[in-house]
Amino acid sequence: MSSTTPKPFLIAKDEQGEFRLTVRETRYNSQGFPWVVATPVEQCFETTAAAKAYAVDQFGAKAGEFATK
C-alpha cells in the first residue's frame, strides 16, 4: 500500500491568475493500491483563502486537508 495518499483538496493557480479547487477522493482496490478520482470545481476564486472557505462550507474540509500547486 502506498504511504503517500494525496490531500483531499488541491488548490492551484490557473493561467489567468485565478485559483481553482479540485476535490480528490482516494479509494483502494482489493490489493491495497490507491485510485484517486479528481473532480474540479467549476467556480474560480480570487484567493486561496476563498477557495478554502468554499471547501469548508461545501465539503466540510478541515485544516491540513489542503495541498497547493
Image (cartoon, rainbow, N blue to C red):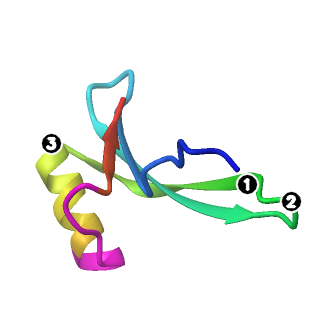
Mark 3: which amino acid?
Thr
For mark 1, give the secondary structure: strand
Residue 30 is left or right of residue 55, and the answer is right
Q: CA distance from mark 3 to mark 1?
A: 29 Å
Check disc 3: other Cα within 10 Å, few if <14, some if 14-19, many if 20+: some
Which numbered circle lies on residue 35? 1
User: Which residue is found at the position 42% from the left and 51% from the top?
Assistant: 7
Q: To which residue does mark 3 refer?
A: 47
Q: To which residue does mark 2 refer?
A: 31
Q: CA distance from mark 2 to mark 1?
A: 11 Å
User: Which residue is found at the position 29% from the left and 70% from the top?
Assistant: 61
Q: Residue 22 at x, y = what percent?
A: 46, 51
- Quadrant where the image shows the C terminus: top left
- The residue at the far right in this view is 30
Q: Earlier in the sequence, mark 3 or mark 2?
A: 2
Residue 49 is left or right of residue 58, and the answer is left
> Which span is picked out in magenta?
57-64
Front-lying residue, 28 or 20: 28
Mark 1: which amino acid?
Trp
Q: Residue 13 at x, y = what percent?
A: 32, 30
For mark 2, give the secondary structure: loop
Dot in front, 2 or 1: 2
